[in-house]
Each structure stands twice: as C-alpha cells, then as structure tokens.
Amino acid sequence: MYIEVNQLRKTFGGYIASDDVSFGIEKGRLVGLLGPSGGGKTTILRMLAGLETPDSGDIYIDGKRVNDVPAQQRGIGFVFQNYALFRHMSVYDNIAFGLTVQKKPKAYIKARVSELIELTGLKGLEKRYPNQLSGGQRQRVAFARALAPEPHLLLLDEPFAAIDAKVRKELRAWLKSTIERIGITTIFVTHDQEEAVEVADEIMIVSGGRLEQKGSPIDIYKNPHTPFVAGFIGESSQLPEPSRLKGFEDELPGAKAIIRPEFVEIGKPGELATPLAAETGVVRNVFFRGSSWQVEVQLGTQSVFAYRSLEKEALRPGDEVLVLIHRLYLFNDEHSRIVENGMKTDPMPVNI
C-alpha cells in the first residue's frame, strides 16, 4: 500500500474526531472521504497533511512513517475549500509560489507553470488576479498551485463546495480525467454522495470519527456493511416492522429495515407481474423528479418510497396501489444483511 494508516486517533477536548481509524490506499488511486458534517473527514485529511498531530496511531506514506515529519517535507499538495489564493498575486505568481519558495531556477519555474496552465485550461488568464476569475477558474488555479512542486500525494478538502451546481458538475469530470492523466494518488473530502460516486475509484465512509466502510462506489451501494452506510448512501427510508411485510415474515426476528426506492415496485391492479407477493397501500404524496415520479405509499403504519416511470399512468394521493418490495437491508443489534423477498419468483426488473 502506498498510504497506510494504523489506529489513528484524534480528540479535541471531549470530542473524538478520529476513533482508531485504519485503512490503506494503493498508489495512483482517487479516493473519496465521504460522510456527514462533523464526522471526522477533514481531521483525517489534515493529519495526513501534517496540519494536525494525531494523539496516537501511525501514518505511512510510501513505506515511511511521517508522524513527525513537518507538513512542508511530506511531499503533499493541499487544496482548500476556500481556494486560499493570494489576492495580490496574479494567476502565474500564485501557481509559481511554491516553486519560488523552494528557490527553483527561473527557467524551471516558467516551464513548470506554463505546463500547469495548459493542463488546467487557464491559458490566457496568467496575468489576471483572483478577483477577476470565476469560482471554477479560481479552483483550477488552486489545483495547479498544489501540483506545481510535483507532490507525491494530493489532498482536496471539499474542493467544489463553494462553486455553483452547473460548474461543479463540469469540474468533477475535469478533475477525474486530469488525475487519471497525471496518475497522482489523491484523496478528496466531500459530503456529496453524487460527487463521491461520480469521481472516486474508492470511497471511504466516515461517521462519528469511525471508518464505516471502504470500497468501490458500486460495492458500497450494493453491499452496505453497516446500518449507517445503508441509510446514508442513496435515498432510503426506515421500516420499524419489516416482519409484517409479505416475503419477509421469517427474516431476522426483531429487526428493523432500510429500504431504497429503486427496490420497490408500485402499480395499479394488473400492472405487477407477481401481485400475490405485493402489499396493498395508499398513495400519500407524489413528487416530480425530472426523469420519474417519486411516490410515497402508506402501508398500514409504515410508509415507503418508490420511483414510477413518467410513461405510466400518473398516480394521485388517495389512490390504492399494489406495492412489491423486492429487497430490504435488515439489521438488529447483532446482525445485518440484505434480504430478497421470499415470495417473489421473478427477477427484479431493471426499470421500475
């Protein structure tokens, strides 16, 4: 592993920001640190960078323990959420700053800055100042400045948080392709699931200072290891009494369930292929989601959400519908697992 973190712990007073966190990252990977605000993501990032000192545990980069190595000697590039550009410096001088501090030859600085300006799409903006740039352009300058000293590891702290939604989507694709082209090991912090899934090769989900799960986006989505991950990734709702549902009566007694809309199929009589495995419910709310309807259905004392194609007949609050639940994530104090509906004989449809 290129990066190894072993039982990293950090507290601030009575607050545990990192609770014996351990993980490994292979060289060249683009990894997303994902979790809710206050979960410990940025603290982990700052300890890797040398901006915070762990109370205990070890950090290894390329086989070398770096706990006592100053931040400026770790070979790390850091991009902050607020860009942290020098307002009195031009784009060119901001990018060149780290190289100037290192007293690199002027010819080398000029060639390196020109290379990064080309890489980051800033050509023609070299003489502008930060207040003359858009948010996306400022973030590209910050990215280029972090890359200028040729770091071995790049750390990004919510790099797109201060940028509007449309530009953020464009920068995500740009960042992923640029990192792949450079091949630098990169870790970025985000609380945006869509961002993590779209950009990262691997995701580490952090909550309450603990690492809940690490894996590829699709593996974490399909196989959550903890109730927190199951409820945090994707849209979901919790069912307190899943044993009352058809096909799940004998599964994990006393368990609660987390269910996602894409695992629920709803329809009027005659629309479902296996109606005997379905519950009868009443539509409570219908929400337009652009490519589909999101429908809230009341099942006795419980409610579930499902997606419904715009091509099908529209549903309205008060309509009686059939609800086929294909899959649940069940958990109690000791166990958790994904369970398929035991009464359903057909495979789950791809488009529901």
Image: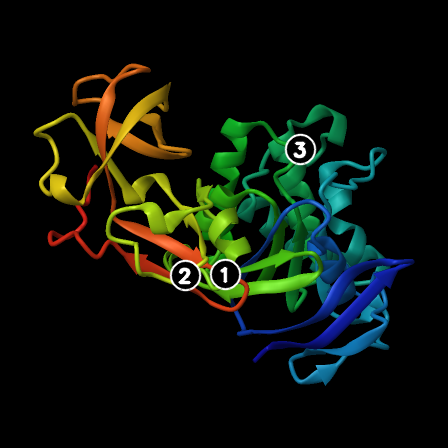
Lower position in the chain sequence, tag 2 or tag 3: 3
Label for residue 274? Answer: none
Residue 325 in which image quadrant: top left
Label 2, on which residue? 253
- Residue 70's spot in the image, x, y percent? 86, 70
In the image, 60: left or right of 27?
right
Q: Amino acid at mark 1?
A: Asn
Number of the front mark, 3 or 1: 1
Is residue 49 visible in the rendered structure shown here?
Answer: no
Disc tally is 3
Real-space CA distance between mark 3 and mark 1, rounded to the nearest whole angstrom: 39 Å
10 Å crowding of disc 3: few (<14), some (14-19), many (20+): some
- Residue 252's spot in the image, x, y percent? 39, 63
Label for residue 162? Answer: 3
10 Å crowding of disc 2: few (<14), some (14-19), many (20+): some
19, above or below 172, in the image: below
Labels 2 and 1 touching (C-beta < 8 A): yes
Circle 3 SS class: loop
Label 1, on which residue? 332
Circle 1 SS class: loop
Identify the residue at horizontal 58%, vertical 37% (top origin): 123
Nearest the viewer among 124 and 69 is 69
- Residue 282's spot in the image, x, y percent? 30, 24
Lower position in the chain sequence, tag 2 or tag 1: 2
- The N terminus lies in quadrant: bottom right
10 Å crowding of disc 1: few (<14), some (14-19), many (20+): some
